[in-house]
Image: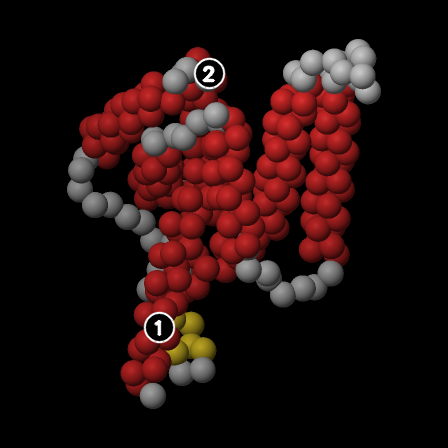
């Protein structure tokens, strides 16, 4: 029984680490879907968010939740400025230029963090530090449990992004076939050409957007107004990855 309990505890610890990496991957997909570029500086931006939390909570002595909120706001503001001032200017450039730019930014952010907070390991206490939860004979760290629960609670956002990704993928495929069809020369059945195919595809894409919007609103209201078990967002993440991959090849 001790071996089984130890195994289950290791599974929970591994699941917590997996949730962190899953959220990072989720961030890569969201950034790519929003900007059509892969940001290799994302990990360093997350690092800066962690150091911001360390500054607010540990160095300034703020309440954990206040510092947590301020760190999120500061990281979001930094990301917005980085996108507006730097990344927007390379949209449309070759992917190699984007890769080199974001890799260079990653090195710069890493060096700035080292100068500002030193290269030593730092940390701060949270409401879950050194606390445990006893479940059916298992002793689980509250920090690991909070990571897993926090990831699963966000499943509505993951599901909504999966719906958006799926609709976006379908729209991209429709647009690809519509463009190819519209360039066909006129024939006996279509003496004025096939240009209206693009208009029809635009109408279909608009309908898909409305369907996705109402679906997401329905899911959100349903989750807010009824007590339900948290759903696993695994399929949502899989749909987003598949959509991102296929969209990349379709765009080529």
Location of residue 139 in the rendering, given as x and y in whole percent from the top left corner: 37, 75
Location of residue 54 in the rendering, given as x and y in whole percent from the top left corner: 33, 42
Q: Is residue 185 left or right of residue 39?
A: right
Q: Where is 9 relative to 42, above or below? A: below
Quadrant in the rendering for residue 214:
top right
Kindly tell me whether residue 77 is visible in this rendering.
no
Task: Say which residue appears at 71% left-offset and 34% top-offset.
Answer: 209
How many circles with numbers are drawn on the protein? 2
Of callouts 2 and 1, which one flags the residue occurring earlier in the amino acid sequence?
1
Task: Say which residue appears at 54% left-offset and 40% top-offset.
Answer: 243
Q: Is residue 145 left or right of residue 105?
A: right
- Residue carrying label 1: 9
Quadrant in the rendering for residue 98:
top left
Residue at mark 2 to residue at mark 1: CA–CA distance: 48 Å
Which quadrant of the figure contains the N terminus? bottom left
Neighbours of disc 1 within 10 Å: few (<14), some (14-19), many (20+): some
**In the drawing, what numbered circle is on residue 92?**
2
Q: Of the residues tagged 2 and 1, which is closer to the observer?
A: 2
């Amino acid at each position: 029984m001790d071996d089984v309990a130890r195994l289950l505890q290791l599974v929970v610890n591994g699941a917590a680490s997996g949730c962190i990496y899953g959220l990072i991957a989720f961030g890569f997909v969201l950034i790519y879907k929003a900007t059509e570029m892969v940001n290799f500086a994302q990990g360093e931006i997350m690092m800066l968010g962690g150091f911001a939390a360390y500054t607010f909570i540990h160095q300034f002595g703020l309440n954990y939740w206040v510092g947590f909120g301020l760190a999120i706001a500061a990281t979001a503001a930094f990301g917005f400025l980085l996108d507006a001032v730097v990344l927007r200017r390379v949209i449309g450039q070759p992917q190699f230029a984007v890769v080199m730019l974001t890799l260079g930014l990653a090195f710069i952010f890493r060096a700035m963090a080292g100068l500002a907070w030193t290269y030593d390991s730092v940390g701060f206490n949270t409401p879950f530090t050194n606390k445990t939860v006893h479940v059916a004979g298992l002793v689980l760290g509250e920090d690991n449990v909070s990571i897993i629960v926090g990831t699963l609670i966000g499943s509505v956002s993951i599901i909504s992004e999966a719906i958006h990704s799926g609709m976006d993928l379908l729209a991209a495929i429709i647009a690809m076939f519509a463009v190819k069809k519209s360039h066909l020369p006129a024939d006996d059945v279509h003496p004025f050409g096939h240009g209206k195919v693009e208009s029809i595809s635009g109408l279909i894409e608009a309908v898909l957007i409305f369907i996705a919007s109402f679906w997401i609103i329905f899911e959100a209201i349903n989750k807010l107004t009824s007590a339900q078990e948290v759903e696993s967002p695994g399929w949502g993440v899989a749909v987003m990855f598949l959509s991102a991959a296929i969209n990349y090849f379709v765009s080529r």
